[in-house]
Image (cartoon, grey):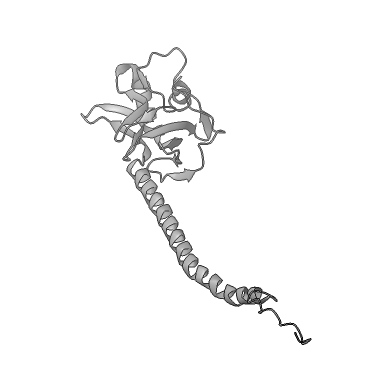
Amino acid sequence: MGDGPAPRPPADPFGDGLLLRRVARWLPFALAGHLLVGVPTLLISLVVAYGTYVQAQATQRMQQAAAWPFVAYDTSNYTDDGRHRINFTLVNNGVGPALLGPVELRYRGRVIRSPVEFLAACCGYRRGDAIQLGTAPPSDVALRPGERIAFLELADVPANARMIAAIERERWKLDVRSCYCSIFEECWTIRGVQAKPVPVAACPTDWVRYRER
């Protein structure tokens, strides 16, 4: 046998960092492929999520519109059948139920807490006078669509003769504020006859409540 150099082993195709170089060479293409697949999928997911959100918002608005109350204050001096009667009412002209919150009354800037206090201030009522008076609670009750509540009414009868002319004149000087809410806990306040409802976060807690008694 000769003394020449020993034969070299065959080169390892994965040795000397060759594998790492191949991975590094193809890695950007692999990542680009994943991005080409993943980005459109992400965009589609975002579009679907946004569409679902918009649809849910639209559905909620439709439900709220279908249950929207519209409360108005009014005063009148005759009934539908022609009888002379002074009425102070709250009516729900909306399409959904109204949950009546606090009501505050002021006459010539003075807070009014009850029906007899108003009649004493405006119309000469004295404690012990015999009168025919109709009342109803204007707060913490629900009004169906089209329903009205007369929280104060005075009929033109002999017992009320001394006060009818005065209240006929002075009823326009009564400043009425009311708050009401929908079943979705959206709330509004109104002030005066044919007032436009003003949205509020919640009914005021600092009003001096008018009460039936």
Residue at the image point whose x is 41% and y is 58% from the top: 48
- Image position, residue 92 (x, y; %): 34, 36
Describe residue 77's horizontal placement relative to residue 104 as left or right. Answer: left
Q: How many marks?
A: 0
51 or 109, which lies in front? Answer: 51
Image height of 66 relative to 29, above or below: above
Left or right: where 28 falls relative to 60: right
Image location of residue 190, percent across then percent down = 44, 41
Q: Give the farthest residue toward the front.
A: 1
- Of all residues, the one furthest to the left in this rendering is 81
User: Depth check: 133 or 127 in front?
Assistant: 133
Residue drawn 35% across the image and 17% down it:
132
Place of residue 21 in the rendered image (x, y in percent of width and height, measured from the top left): 65, 77
Front residue of 118 and 73:
73
The picture quadrant where one finds residue 67 is top left
Question: Which residue occupies the foreground of this view, 31 or 71?
Answer: 31
